[in-house]
């Protein structure tokens, strides 16, 4: 059994690596690629859990992750970026180095939290949860330190990836997982598409800073 | 066989599907009102219905209160929205195609809020709340002005983060429940979890509660997680502001309360009440001070919502039958009053063509009836007797005083500060020389008057049946 | 007993000489693979030996402003690197001096060699030497801590800082797929690329001084000094390849108790793995472009981040790992 857990940890670790990769990129196109890789890795991790824990319903989740988040959404976003002529560079609030270091701190925080708390659960479940929490926090970090609207959405979706990983790690969590998974993906896609289009119509850039300037009467 | 309680969810969603297909906005508005009335009827029926604890749904004393308020305010808002939207189309702010969208989303939002309210499965509760939030995000951006888009974007980002954190908390609760209840659906069923709460791992519960507090607390509008609230209220269409303040905040608070009940039942876990008291006070006082600097009328009342939600969280954090009763009463009163205020604000905005407070003056001269109603509503929310809000605030303060006299000073102080600000602004709008344009107000004042009448009636005389009802719910809260 | 002792001595001596002899061959393999992949004929495999021999015969021209440091540095650098390379267990673990093969000692030796090289680069006072030295130290600032983290992670896992002990541990344990090891591997590969001045960090074949890091520091050297410095850099490559093999692919390594036949077998396996690693390096260098210098801290920083992550995860799964 430990071999199976090792592989799922390896895949979770790979997802964590892609989260760092997301922070590392300087171009929007590479951010989308890294996100696609992360989603594909998620699909593999979920599929592996489905096979080794004998939970066939998780295959659906894996398929959704692969199809929607691994292929369709990155492609759609890339087309949008090209068509709308959105800035190809990722505008940064904080540079790559500091962002990576903060990401490291967040990973340590996630480990410490989970290790302290879940003393009752098995160690492999703890590790999986810690990795998933780290991925969620890193997605959150990405939303904060990158100014481009597209990358903010990608950050949110990578947060979702982490959540899905956590949910699959929780043994036996029922069908609601699939429902909420599909839900989040659909709604997020719908909302962000709507927004990016509306933003484009009013501005030439998807830079959040430009949005901030147009605050109007803030009081 | 469709059970009656399922109707409270099915009717809105069916109506939503229907509304997508109806091209005419007038017909859509009518269907909207009818569907809301039907849902209200079902909600009323459920009060008399047997209480139910199922696999996925639960109807107990606590959430039936929320369901009734939800459906009632939903109905009156649909009424208000019918006339309001007509005006928006005529003034060109909205196109008919978007209105079709708007009506469908309105019903879908009501449906998903009901899903969250009657859910026994914590995952389903999360789904309902998430769906409702995301729908409101889109509706906030409906006008597609730069400010609206910025507000909607900010709301989207903060709501998404809140959603995700709340989901993680949900997973943690499941993990905590797993050893006691086994894998699968039982470990996600709230009623079962509540039954074994004392046996659950306290540390996991602690961590889960933190995540849930931050996640759902963002949607309740607790400071410092409130940043999305003022903009979302100000830039969206007025019916949405009414629904946000009157309903969505309540549903989020309800979710928080369910988890509070869970964590309190475990003696070794942290005391959720204490944290809630602190956060509630912070929100209350912070929002009260922020009221002074507002220049936009909707933002003003958005901060007032934050203030009152803070007071409610404070009350529920105090705990005990009296404080819980007061909290529930205040929640009901606030829903009615605040949505009534937003109805009035909607009329005012249409009458003056602006939301800036500096440009809204002399309403008593130009629109006397509206001015009177508006003044009454503001006085109500300020907590003046004989309105119901006074009753609930008084109860909260006296309960706190009985427990800890010095502590009672803080909410009293906050409420007074807020009172001052609102009165100041009210004076400015009602009296003085009228400035700027002054259009006729098309809509009917009936929804507003209905709300005010209810609040007044509750303040003067609360029927014993209602009292008993609230008391039973308060007992459940622990 | 003495026979045994002599045998042990010979084995250790064999390791030292083997490392020295195979280094130019490894570099030759890298260059040949690169050339062939670029559809060039490329230099013959043994060309590097000939280059070194040629340099040894030539006269060493030294600038007037050079100090004693400039003259002595190549010898010291060569000695330090050779000792370090000889310490890494190659074909057998548990040779005579393996108690000295401590990972921390390894890092110290390499650090000393690097410091000397950087000083020598600045010694003559040319601007390019200064550029090379400052860039080298910038990379080292991140690469060395990363290296320490990596070796510490592995040491924690194996319970000892002796390289031989680590190798034994990883031979004994089935090489299970563990996140920590994977992360350490990636980090060590990045550090190895940075330390050996390979693409994407530095182009060893460049002639443009402004793009140089390592080459810039040795621009002023000629004759036997240059031969020694070049040999040292070849040895460093073998050291890192050997380290990677010892830590992450130690199968085939003869245990301490094996006799000469075991050692011979181990030697053949090791040489094969080494040359395979060199070939892979060649393929890698052809596939990737060199990075801009100001992106280097980010790149090497990734190694640091991964090393740190590896330690974090190792601590978390204490029970599961060791």
Image (cartoon, rainbow, N blue to C red):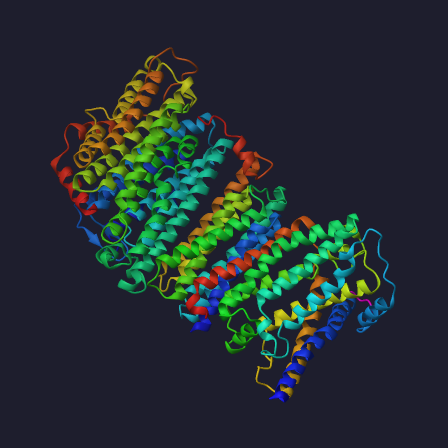
Residue C231 part of the magenta segment: no
Can see residue B68? no
Q: Which residues are magenta?
A: C38-42
> Residue A166: where, in percent of width, then height?
42, 58
**Is residue C117 placed above or below A124 in the rendered structure?**
above
Q: Is residue C148 above or below residue C263?
A: above
**In the rendered image of this protein, does residue B390 appear above or below residue C90?**
above
A88 vs A111, left or right, is right
Identity of the residue drawn at 32% across and 50% down: B209
Most common SS among magenta residues: loop
Q: Quadrant of the N terminus of chain C?
A: bottom right
| Residue C171 lies in quadrant | bottom right
Q: Give x and y (percent) for residue C294.
A: 67, 48
Q: Residue at x 76, y 67 (%)?
A: C231
Residue A194 position in % (x across, y down): 50, 42
Please give the name of the residue rendered at 40% of the width and 62% of the height, measured from the top-left corner. Answer: A126
Front-lying residue, B406 or B216: B406
List x then y, in percent, for residue A46. Answer: 46, 63
């Amino acid at each position: 059994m430990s071999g199976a857990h090792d592989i799922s940890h390896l895949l979770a670790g790979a997802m964590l690596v892609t989260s760092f990769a997301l922070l590392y990129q300087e171009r929007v196109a590479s951010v989308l690629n890294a996100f696609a890789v992360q989603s594909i890795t998620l699909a593999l991790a979920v599929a592996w859990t489905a096979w080794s824990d004998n939970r066939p319903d998780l295959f659906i989740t894996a398929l959704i992750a692969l199809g929607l988040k691994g292929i369709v959404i990155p492609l759609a976003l890339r087309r949008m970026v090209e068509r709308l002529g959105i800035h190809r560079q990722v505008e940064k609030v904080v540079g790559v180095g500091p962002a990576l270091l903060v990401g490291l701190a967040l990973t340590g925080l996630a480990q410490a939290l989970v290790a302290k708390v879940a003393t009752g659960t098995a160690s492999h479940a703890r590790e999986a949860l810690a990795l998933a929490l780290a991925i969620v926090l890193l997605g959150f970090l990405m939303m904060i330190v990158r100014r481009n609207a597209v990358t903010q959405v990608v950050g949110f979706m990578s947060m979702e990836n982490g959540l899905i990983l956590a949910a699959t790690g929780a043994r036996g969590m029922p069908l609601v997982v699939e429902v909420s998974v599909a839900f989040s993906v659909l709604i997020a896609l719908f909302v962000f598409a709507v927004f990016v289009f509306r933003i484009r119509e009013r501005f030439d850039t998807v830079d959040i800073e430009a949005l901030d300037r147009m605050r109007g009467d803030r009081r | 066989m469709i059970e009656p309680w399922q109707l409270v969810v099915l009717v809105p969603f069916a109506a939503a599907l229907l509304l997508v297909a109806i091209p005419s906005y007038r017909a859509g508005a009518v269907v909207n009102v009818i569907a809301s009335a039907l849902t209200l009827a079902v909600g009323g029926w459920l009060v008399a219905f047997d209480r139910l604890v199922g696999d996925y749904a639960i109807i107990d004393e606590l959430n039936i209160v929320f369901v009734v308020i939800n459906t009632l305010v939903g109905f009156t808002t649909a009424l208000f929205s019918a006339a309001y939207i007509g005006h928006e189309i005529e003034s060109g702010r909205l196109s008919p195609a978007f209105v079709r969208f708007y009506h469908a989303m309105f019903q879908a939002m009501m449906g998903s809020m009901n899903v969250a309210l009657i859910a026994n499965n914590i995952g389903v509760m999360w789904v309902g709340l998430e769906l409702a939030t995301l729908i409101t995000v889109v509706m906030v951006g409906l006008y597609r002005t730069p400010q609206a888009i910025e507000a909607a974007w900010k709301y989207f980002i903060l709501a998404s983060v809140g959603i995700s954190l709340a989901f993680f908390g949900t997973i943690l609760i499941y993990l905590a429940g797993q050893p006691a209840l086994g894998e699968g659906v039982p470990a996600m069923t709230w009623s079962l979890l509540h039954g074994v709460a004392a046996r659950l791992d306290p540390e996991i519960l602690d961590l889960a509660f933190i995540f849930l507090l931050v996640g759902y607390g963002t949607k309740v509008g607790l400071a410092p997680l409130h940043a999305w609230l003022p903009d979302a209220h100000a830039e969206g269409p007025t019916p949405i502001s009414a629904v946000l303040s009157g309903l969505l905040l309540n549903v989020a608070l309800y979710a928080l309360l369910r988890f509070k009940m869970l964590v309190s039942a475990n003696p070794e876990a942290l005391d959720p009440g204490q944290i809630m008291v602190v956060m509630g006070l912070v929100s209350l006082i912070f929002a009260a001070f922020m009221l002074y600097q507002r220049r936009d009328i909707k933002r003003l009342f958005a901060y007032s919502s934050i203030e009152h939600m803070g007071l409610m969280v404070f009350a529920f954090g105090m705990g005990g039958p009296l404080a819980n009763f007061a909290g529930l009463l205040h929640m009901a009163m606030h829903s009615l009053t605040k949505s009534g205020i937003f109805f009035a604000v909607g009329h005012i905005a249409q009458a003056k063509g602006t939301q800036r407070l500096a440009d809204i003056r002399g309403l008593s001269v130009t629109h006397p009836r509206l001015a009177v109603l508006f003044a009454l509503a503001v006085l109500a929310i300020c907590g003046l007797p004989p309105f119901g809000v006074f009753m609930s605030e008084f109860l909260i303060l006296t309960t706190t005083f009985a427990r800890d006299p010095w502590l009672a000073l803080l909410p009293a102080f906050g409420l007074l500060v807020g009172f001052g600000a609102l009165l100041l602004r009210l004076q400015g709008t009602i009296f003085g020389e009228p400035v700027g344009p002054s259009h006729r107000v098309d809509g009917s004042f009936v929804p507003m008057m209905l709300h005010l009448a209810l609040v007044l009636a509750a303040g003067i005389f609360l029927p014993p049946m209602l009292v008993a009802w609230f008391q039973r719910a308060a007992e459940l809260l622990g | 007993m003495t026979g045994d002792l002599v045998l042990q001595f010979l084995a250790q001596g064999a390791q030292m000489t083997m490392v020295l002899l195979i280094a130019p061959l490894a570099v030759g393999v890298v260059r040949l693979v690169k050339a062939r992949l670029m559809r060039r004929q490329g230099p013959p495999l043994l060309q590097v030996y000939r280059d070194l021999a040629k340099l040894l015969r030539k006269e060493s021209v030294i600038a007037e402003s050079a100090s004693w440091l400039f003259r002595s540095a190549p010898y010291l650098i060569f000695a330090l690197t050779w000792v370090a390379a000889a310490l890494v267990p190659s074909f057998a673990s548990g040779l005579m001096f393996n108690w000295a093969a401590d990972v921390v000692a390894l890092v110290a030796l390499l650090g000393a060699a690097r410091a000397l090289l950087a000083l020598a680069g600045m010694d003559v006072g040319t601007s390019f030497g200064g550029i090379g030295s400052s860039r080298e130290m910038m990379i080292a600032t991140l690469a060395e801590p990363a290296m320490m983290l990596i070796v510490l992670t592995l040491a924690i896992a194996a319970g000892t800082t002796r390289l031989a002990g680590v190798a034994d541990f990883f031979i004994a344990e089935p090489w299970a797929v563990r996140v920590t090891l994977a992360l350490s591997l990636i980090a060590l590969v990045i550090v190895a690329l940075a330390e050996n001045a390979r693409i994407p960090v530095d182009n060893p074949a460049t002639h443009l001084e402004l793009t140089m890091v390592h080459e810039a520091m040795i621009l002023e050297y000629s004759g036997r000094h240059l031969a020694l410095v070049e040999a040292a850099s070849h040895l460093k490559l073998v050291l890192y390849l050997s380290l990677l093999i010892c830590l992450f692919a130690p199968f085939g390594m003869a245990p301490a108790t094996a006799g000469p036949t075991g050692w011979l077998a181990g030697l053949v396996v090791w040489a094969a793995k080494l040359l395979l690693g060199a070939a892979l390096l060649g393929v890698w260098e052809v596939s990737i472009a060199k990075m801009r210098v100001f992106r280097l801290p980010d790149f090497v920083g990734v190694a640091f981040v991964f090393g740190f992550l590896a330690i974090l995860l190792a601590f978390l799964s204490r029970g599961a790992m060791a």
